[in-house]
Amino acid sequence: DVKVTQSSRYLVKRTGEKVFLECVQDMDHENMFWYRQDPGLGLRLIYFSYDVKMKEKGDIPEGYSVSREKKERFSLILESASTNQTSMYLCASSFSSGRGTYNEQFFGPGTRLTVL
Amino acid sequence: AQSVTQPDIHITVSEGASLELRCNYSYGATPYLFWYVQSPGQGLQLLLKYFSGDTLVQGIKGFEAEFKRSQSSFNLRKPSVHWSDAAEYFCAVVGDYKLSFGAGTTVTVRA
């Protein structure tokens, strides 16, 4: 079974703090993704990575950065947390797709971040 | 750019009754379509997917969905709902090699 794990289920931070959210997958997937989930908005893509040290901006990258030093690990960084970044953060991974194809994404359980 | 609309924010259904969740998509080419379910406190689990071929797709947990190109729809159905089906359901479409999700429909099951 594919397993995507996230370092924390719940996290409380203060405004201005630097926050690291970690995601690890055990299926040797090339692609990894970070989403945030907000009521009424569904899931929105923050960043994704298609290889080690490679990253692409998603739909809402402002205020976030990412790091992928190893294939199995993808980190989301909030350089200076703000209250509007209070949300559920979901990590996902998938095999790489050839052009015209698409592979299923597997999701972690999520991290609920509260910024006070 | 692609987009997904789920018109129903919340649906309440009795246990044993049928369920239909609506999904409309916007995408210029042939879409890849998905339904995911998120149980309370859990990540997303894939219920079913449509890439091509038969427009009626069978998934896990007794769910099925029908792709209708003329209506740009991919509605999810289950003939008889169980209490464990209470969850949030997301429809998604692939475009530009990225998933775009709808806002979700929360399903409440009453005894």
Image: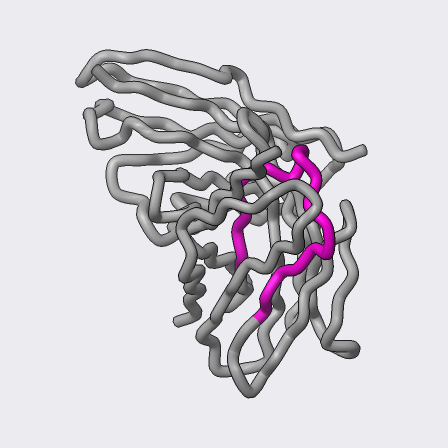
Residue B55 position, x and y percent, is 72, 76
Residue A59 position, x and y percent, is 35, 53
Residue A81 position, x and y percent, is 24, 23
Q: Is residue A55 visible?
A: no
Which segment did they paint magenta?
B74-92
Split into 4 quadrants, where in the image is the C terminus of chain B? top right
Q: Residue at x 66, y 50 (%)?
A: B17
Left or right: where does residue A27 sit relative to residue A9? right
Queried whether the magenta region covers residue B79, the answer comes back as: yes
The residue sitting at the bottom extreme is: B70
Q: Residue at x 52, y 39 (%)?
A: B108
Which quadrant would residue A107 be assigned to in this image? top right
Which quadrant would residue A109 be assigned to in this image? top right
Q: Residue at x 41, y 30 (%)?
A: A88
Choose between B40 and A116: the one closer to the eye: B40
Left or right: where does residue B80 sit relative to residue B34? right
Split into 4 quadrants, where in the image is the N terminus of chain B? bottom left
Residue A31 position, x and y percent, is 61, 46
For the image shown, how many numbered marks are present on the structure?
0
Q: Is residue B41 visible?
A: yes
Identify whether A17 is placed above or below A61: above
Choose between A27 and B6: the one closer to the eye: B6
